[in-house]
Image: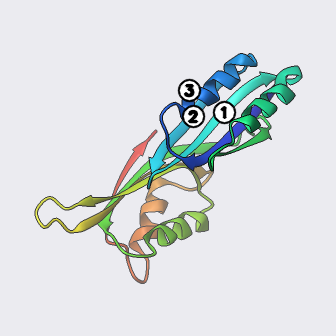
């Protein structure tokens, strides 16, 4: 029988870090299904979905534990198969003036509509002419039944203190 694991990796970035984790997975006959990894402020942050035979699980966990040196932390969480809810995928891109609390305002509006954020990437960008900092975010969303892209757009347009953002909706 197979076990599904989600690995969370956090620590100081260094060359060969992903290689050492993938070697441990391979050595225990695991299959690296998907991952998201990034370097932020000198730190490495990663998520990986690994499938492994149950009889190899203990040995893999020991191997991953042995890699936890010099501030590196690896958390392995067993996961279940995802439920098959009927949700409509949607991509949302935002661009506007950066300010404290903008992520909170965006996520509050999405949560009010029971929208699941499946992926969120954000960064600061310099405006082409002025050089002032702009906020940019790309979100992959899952809309519940009965919620439309127009509902999402309306939630941002009808704020008492409207967000100054450009919205681009693309059905994924």
Looking at the image, residue 125 lies above or below residue 73: below
User: How far apart are the alpha carbons under marks 2 and 1?
Assistant: 6 Å
Measured as percent of width and height from the top left, residue 19 is found at: 56, 26
Report the colour scheme. Answer: rainbow
Instruction: From the viewer's perspective, tell me whether residue 72 is left or right of residue 167.
Output: right
Looking at the image, residue 38 lies above or below residue 2: below
Mark 3, residue position: 19
Q: Residue at x 76, y 38 (%)?
A: 65
Measured as percent of width and height from the top left, residue 67 is found at: 68, 36
Mark 2 or mark 1: name the one nearer the start of the chain: 2
Element class at badge 3:
helix
Choose top left, top right, bottom left or bottom right for residue 32: top right
User: How far apart are the alpha carbons under marks 1 and 3?
Assistant: 15 Å
Element class at badge 2:
strand
- Residue extending furthest bottom? 160
Q: From the image, which quarter does the N terminus lie in? A: top right
User: How far apart are the alpha carbons under marks 3 and 2?
Assistant: 13 Å
Instruction: From the viewer's perspective, tell me whether residue 129 is left or right of residue 85.
Output: left
Q: Nearer the viewer, mark 1 or mark 3?
A: 3
Q: Residue at x 80, y 37 (%)?
A: 80
Choose top left, top right, bottom left or bottom right for residue 20: top right
Q: Which mark is residue 35?
A: 2
Instruction: From the viewer's perspective, tell me whether residue 117 is left or right of residue 26.
Output: left
Q: Nearer the viewer, residue 45 or 5?
A: 45
Q: Which mark is residue 49?
A: 1
Q: Tell me, yes or no, whether the two marked residues, 3 and 2, touch with CB atoms within 8 Å.
A: no
Element class at badge 1:
strand
Please tell me how crowded label 1 is: few (under 14), some (14-19), or many (20+) other residues with Cα within 10 Å: some
Q: Tell me, yes or no, whether the two marked residues, 2 and 1, touch with CB atoms within 8 Å.
A: yes
Q: Residue at x 48, y 72 (%)?
A: 105
């Amino acid at each position: 029988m197979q076990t599904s694991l989600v690995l969370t990796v956090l620590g100081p970035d260094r060359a060969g870090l992903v290689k050492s984790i993938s070697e441990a997975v391979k050595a225990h006959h695991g299959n690296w299904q998907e991952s998201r990894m990034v370097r932020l402020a000198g730190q490495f942050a990663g998520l990986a979905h690994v499938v492994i035979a149950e009889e190899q699980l203990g040995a893999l966990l020991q191997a991953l534990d042995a890699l936890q040196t010099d501030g590196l932390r690896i958390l392995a969480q067993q996961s279940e198969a995802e439920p098959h809810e009927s949700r409509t995928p949607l991509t949302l891109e935002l661009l506007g003036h950066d300010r404290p609390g903008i992520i909170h305002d965006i996520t509050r509006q999405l949560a009010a509509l029971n929208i699941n954020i499946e992926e969120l990437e954000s960064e600061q960008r310099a405006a082409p002419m002025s050089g002032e900092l702009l906020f940019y975010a790309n979100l992959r969303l899952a809309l519940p039944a009965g919620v439309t892209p127009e509902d999402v757009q309306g939630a941002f347009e009808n704020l008492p203190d409207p967000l100054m953002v450009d919205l681009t909706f693309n059905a994924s």
